Image (cartoon, rainbow, N blue to C red):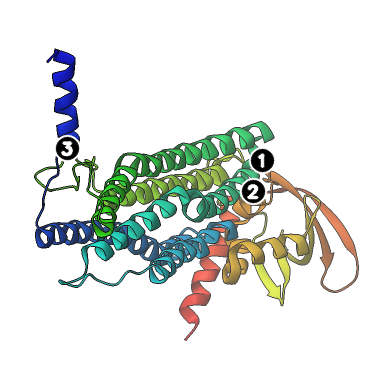
Amino acid sequence: MAPDEFQQAWQAQASRTRVTIDADLLRQEVQRDQQDFRTKIFYRDFGEVGVALMLIPIWITLGVMTESTWSWYLTVPVLIWMSGFMLVYRRRHQQQPSEPDEPLLSCVQRSITEVDDQIWLLRNVFWWYLLPPSVSILIFFAHTSWLARSGGELYALIFFLLLAGSLVAVYSWVYSLNQRAVRLQLEPRRQELLTLLTSLQDETTGNAAQDQIALPGLPFTDQKLCMPRTSPVRIIIGVFVLLFIIMLLVVYLMSANLHFLSGKDDPRTSPFAAVRWQESQPEVKVQEEWYQLVSLDGISASEIVAFSKQTYGDKWQKRFEEDLVELLTRMGHPPADQVTLGVQSLTSSERKTLAGVPMTYENRRAIRNAAQQRERSEP
């Protein structure tokens, strides 16, 4: 017999070779592998949902402490959406735990369903996990840059592009990690389970299995799944921490911008020696005389008050009195060392313009001291 004939005969014999495996042992191995997969997914979900829920009170507290603008709080409903989506998705695709005597075919089919659910989740991670916070954070970055435009529109644009670029870089990395997990971990796992399912179906229909059954963890497995070197939970927490640091940096830069873009070493100045209120109308003391404030550098007093209410909420009066420079800077009108006041007499309808009114630290300190005295006198 020629060598080629020997080779053909050997291949024909090998093609008829079958591996006989104890069904109970195989079922136990499939169930053990299924439980390991569920455990990994549980800890991943726990990390995502837990960190999102933990960030909600932290986000609100930080916003209150730093007196951030309304755009900061847009991320709060996004965090609720992310955690809620994950909980609802897992609830709708929850699989029943395997029974010890469950048929092997059903166990494998359930494992394939679980893998398919996870593949769908990661392949669509952009829509439910990355896009919502991207929108809220980009709005915050855009709003912050807009408020910083007093340093120049080009500066504000560069500021926004740097922040947006950092966000895109981080989220691109997160997206690539998820797609890599699908490609290197979930797809090979799915193919091995499908191979096993086909072999079992062939056995059920009476057809001989032609290939060796490959399942992760069994002695006859030729391939092992590529497991991540870093825990997914650590990656998720790391991403959240990185984004949180970026947001804190933005808040810090915003605060520094508001304090120093006006060209003053100390923004705690005021043109008023004292301030009092008639409902929402400020009355100011200038040069030992009280007036009703009509405008400041051409900006109506009602516009300044409305912006303070919108930006600072319940602290709008305090910010108008004690942090006028910051308030005007946020409006895009940082004051100079001297301002022009439009005022009206309290005893008549006469209006006049006070030009060259100096912004002094002494005025602001007097207003602050008066506010502290009022606070101490309140019960």
In the depicted view, which residue is nearer to us: 367 or 303?
A: 303
Q: Secondary structure at mark 2?
A: helix
Q: Position of residue 87 (x, y in %)?
A: 40, 68
Seen at 53% across and 50% down, the residue is 131
**What whole-number distance in Å separates the C-alpha atoms at marks 3 and 1?**
65 Å
Q: Residue furthest front?
A: 1
Q: Amino acid at mark 1?
A: Ser
In the depicted view, which residue is nearer to us: 4 or 300?
A: 4
Residue position marked by numbered label 3 in the rendering: 222
Q: Amino acid at mark 2?
A: Thr
Q: Position of residue 367 (x, y in %)?
A: 58, 64
Seen at 34% across and 44% down, the residue is 187
Q: Amino acid at mark 3?
A: Asp
Asked if the residue at tag 3 contacts the one at tag 2, i.e. Cβ–Cβ closer than 8 Å, the answer is no
Please tell me whether residue 375 is drawn above or below residue 62 in the rendered image. below
Q: Residue furthest bottom?
A: 379
Quadrant (top left/top right/bottom left/bottom right) for the N terminus: top left
Task: Please rate how many residues cluster around mark 2, counting C-alpha atoms within 10 Å: few if below 14, some from 14 to 19, many from 20.
Answer: many
Seen at 69% across and 61% down, the residue is 307
Asked if residue 218 lies left or right of residue 151, the reply is: left
Residue position marked by numbered label 2 in the rendering: 329
Q: Which comes before the other along the chain, label 1 or label 2? A: 1
In the depicted view, which residue is nearer to us: 171 or 39?
A: 39
Q: Quadrant of residue 311?
A: bottom right
Q: Position of residue 161 (x, y in %)?
A: 57, 35
Q: Which comes before the other along the chain, label 2 or label 3? A: 3
**What whole-number distance in Å separates the C-alpha atoms at marks 1 and 2?**
7 Å
In the depicted view, which residue is nearer to us: 39 or 335?
A: 39
Q: Position of residue 2 (x, y in %)?
A: 14, 13
Residue position marked by numbered label 1 in the rendering: 150
Q: Secondary structure at mark 1?
A: helix
